[in-house]
Amino acid sequence: MSRPGERKLPHLFKPGHLGRFATPNMIKYGACCVSNYNTRDGYITPRELARTRVIAGTGCGIITNQGAYPDPRGEGKSYFRQVALYDDKFLPQFETIARCIHDAKAVAIQQILHAGRYGGIDLGYCVQPSVVPQTLPHFRPPREMSREDIRRCIAEHVEAAKRAIRAGFDGVEVTSFMGYLLASFNSKFTNQRSDEYGGSIQNRGRFMRELIDCIKQALPEHPLVVRLNGAELMDRWGGNTEDECFELMQQAAGCGVDMISVTVGWQEAPESSIGRDVAPGHWNYLAARAKRECPNTLVAFGNRLPDPRMADDCLAKGEFDYWEVCRPMLADPELVHKAAEDRLDEVRRCIGSLNCLSRVFRDLPYTCTMNPALGHEVEPEYAITPAAVKKKIMVIGAGPAGMEFAITAAKRGHAVTVYEKSERIGGNLIGYAANDLARPEDLQSVVRHYEVMAPKLGVEMKFGVEANAKFMRSVLHQYDVCIVAAGARIDLEAYAHLEGRERLVDALEVARGRVQPGRRVVVIGAGKIGLVVAESLRKNGAEVTLVEADKRIGADVMPTFKWRHNAWVEELGIRVLTSTRLARVTAEGAVVRDAKGQETSIPADTVIASAPRRANQEMFAEFEWMIDELHGCGDALMPRGMDAAIHEGYRLGARI
Amino acid sequence: MSPQSLERFSDLPAWQAMLDRHQPLFEEMLPGSRIGILPRSATSLLPGRRLAGLAAMDLPEGRMLSWEAKEEGMRVGVRSCLRFEEAQVDLLLVPDDAALEAILASLGGDALAVMKKMIRQGNMLFFVMKAKHELQEAGYEDFLDSLGLAFLGACR
C-alpha cells in the first residue's frame, strides 16, 4: 500500500484470494448491466473491446465481464445486442477481453446470463420453470421447461463456462440477478412445478444446486460465483421472503460455490433498489446477513453503495468480503485510482439517474449522464487530447453545459474563463436539486464536482457578470472563442396574450427560493421542472394543482424515473389536470380550459409557469461579429436537461 | 369472496356503465383486445403460498370478468379462466378482497382511479400476457398509463 489513499482505505486495498487466484485488492467490478454495444447475433465488437480496455484499467482486483447467453436458440438472450457464448466461434474476442483483464493484473470472471422470464428477446416466447406471465409489458410469453429442457440448459451453462475458461478467464459467474432464469427457479412466485424442481425450497433450489455441481465438476480448479437475491422485493406476488433467499444462499454455499454476490430486487419489483431515492448503504444489512449465514463463502456486495469509504468501513466490520461495484465506475472509471491516490474529491459520482438502464430497456446502447465518453472509447473524437492550437476561450454560463465544456477544454490546454450572471456554479441545476425529493445530494454532487475541478484545472470563474452586447464590447479581441451555454428560461412570453399574465410567477425563480409562493398554488406544466416544484411545494404544505396541456405528465422525465414522479404526485395528493391549458390568471387564481373547451376556476394565491421553456440564444445574433469562433451547447441550443448539457459540453470541449 | 361481493362482481350492467364513462381511454384499442379481472380469493394466488394456477372455482362456471374492445366500444362479459394459458386476455387483473370491495364500491364513480391505487398498494396483481409491441399496436398505452403501469422494465 504505497499510495496515500490506500493507507486511508486499508481494507479495500488489501490483497485477497478468489479460489487459487490472488486479487490485488478487495474490489470486484460487477457485471451490472449489458452494454448493447455488440452485434445482433452475439459477436463482440471493437466498440465493446475499447470499452473493456477501460474497464480492465479501473484498478479492480476482480473484473466480471458482462453476461453472455449460453444457448444457441437465444432463449437466454434478454438484451438486443447481448453477447453470446454458445459456440467456439465467439472465442477470439473473449480471449482478447481475458487478456486485457490479465494485463491489468486482475482476476477475470465471465458472467453467464440466461434471462429466463426476461429472455427470448428475438423469439416469440421465453422459458421458465412454469407458465407465470410477467407483470410488466416488456417481455415474451412464457413456456414451461421440461425436464429435458432443464438438463439441456444446465449442459449449455457448463459448455459456456468451459468455453470461458478456454478463452482465458479464471472463473465464471452465473447470475440470478433481477429475476433471471436461476431466480425464477428459486422463487415460489414463478416456480409452480409439481416435480422435483418445484414445491419445497429444497426442490426449488435443485436447479441451482445441479447447475453449481455440474460447473464445479467440469471446472474444479476455477472459481464459481453465483449472484443471488438477498431480497427479491416481490413479496406482494408471493415471491420469496428474505429468509427463503438466505436459505437458498446456504444451499449454494453448501454446494461449494466460491463466492456469492448479493443483489437486490427483480426487474418487476414495485420498489426501488438502485435508484436515486434509495439511500446509500440501505441494503448493506443483506450482505451482512449473507456473511453471517455463509461464513465460509466469500460474499461480494455493492447495491447502492457507491462510496469507497463506506465500502471500506463495511469491509472493516466484516459485513462482506469484496466491494462489488459497477455503476459508479460507469460514471467515473478512475474511481478506484482516485481513491488510492486520495483524490476522492475529484470523483464524478453516479447520481442514480439510471440513464444507463433507461436506454438498455429501449434496446439502445447504454450511456451515462456523468460520463459522456462511455461507449465512445473506440472513437478518437471522444478522447481528451492536447489541443493543437491553444486558445483563449470565454464561456457564458456556469451550468452543467458550460462547466463541462470548461473543464474538458482546460484539460486539453486551453485557457478558459467562465462568465456567470449569478454568484455560483450550477445554473438551473441548483434550484432543481434543492427541490428534488429523491436525493438532492446526488444532483448537488454534480455542482460540487465542477466547483472542485475548475480551480484544479485553472479555469477562471467570473461571477455576477451579465453577458450582453455591451459586455462583449468590453472584452472585444481578448478571446478567440465564445461558448454560449446560457441555458434556458421559462418562456413567459408564451402567455403574453393571456389576461392576468403579469400575475404569473417563474418556476425557476420559485425553485431558487427567490420567490415565495402562497399556500394555494397552481403549477402550469407537468414536465420535470413543474413536477419537482409542485412536489416540493406540496411536501412543504402547500395545496398544489398541476395543469398539463399534454395527455400525460412527465413527458421529459427519464423513463426509469417517470414512475417515481407518478407515485409522488399520487402519494402527496397533488391534483393533476391533463389535456388542460391555462386560460387566464385572476386575483383569485387560475382559470383553465380542458380539451373540450370547458373552463374551470382553481383558487390559488400563486400561479407558477414551468413551461414552455425557451433557449437563451439571443446572444448568438448579438455576438456573431464580435468573436472569431462562436459555439453553443446545452439548453442554450434547445431546452432539454442535464444529460444533454453535460454530453454536449464535453463533446465541444473535446474537439475545439 | 362473500355472496354479496360475488353478486356485485357479476353485476355486468354496473361494470358496463363504468366502462361507458371511460370509453375515450379505450378508443385506440383494436377490436378483440381483452382485459380479464379475476378475484384473487377465487384463485390460488395467495401471498406467501405456492401458486397452483388460477382455478376460479368459486365463480359461476369458473369464469372471469372480461372487458373486450369491440366496434361499439369496450364491452363487459364473462370468459373461462382456469389457467394462465387459457386466459386469452392481454392483461389480467387480480384484485384481493379489499381491492375488489373498493372497486365495486366505486363502480358508480371513478373505479379506474381506485384500481390504480389498489395496484400501487399491492392489493391488485396484474399479469401482462402480451409483449410490449403487441400491446402498443393494440392501443393499450392510454389504458396502461391510466393504471400507472410503466411500459418499460423497471430495474429501479
Image (cartoon, coloured by chain):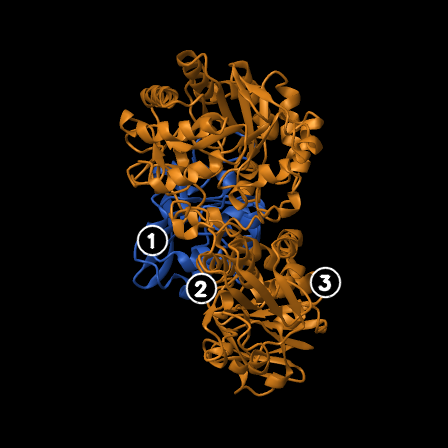
| Chain for disc number 2 | B
Kindly identify the residue that appears in the image at 48 percent across and 22 percent down: A204
**Badge 2: few (under 14), some or many (20 or more) residues near its Cα, within 10 Å?**
some
Using the rendered image of the protein, determine whether residue A117 is visible from the camera's viewpoint.
yes
**Amino acid type of disc 2?**
His
Q: Nearer the viewer, residue B87 or A191?
A: A191
Q: Quadrant of the N terminus of chain A?
A: top right
Tell me the element at label 2: loop
**Number of callouts in the render?**
3
Q: Position of residue B89 (x, y in %)?
A: 36, 46
Mark 3 — residue?
A540
**Amino acid type of disc 1?**
Ser
Tell me the element at label 1: loop
Q: Position of residue A593 (x, y in %)?
A: 51, 79
Q: Position of residue A499 (x, y in %)?
A: 57, 88
Mark 1 vs mark 3: give the one in front: 3
Q: Colour of chain A?
A: orange
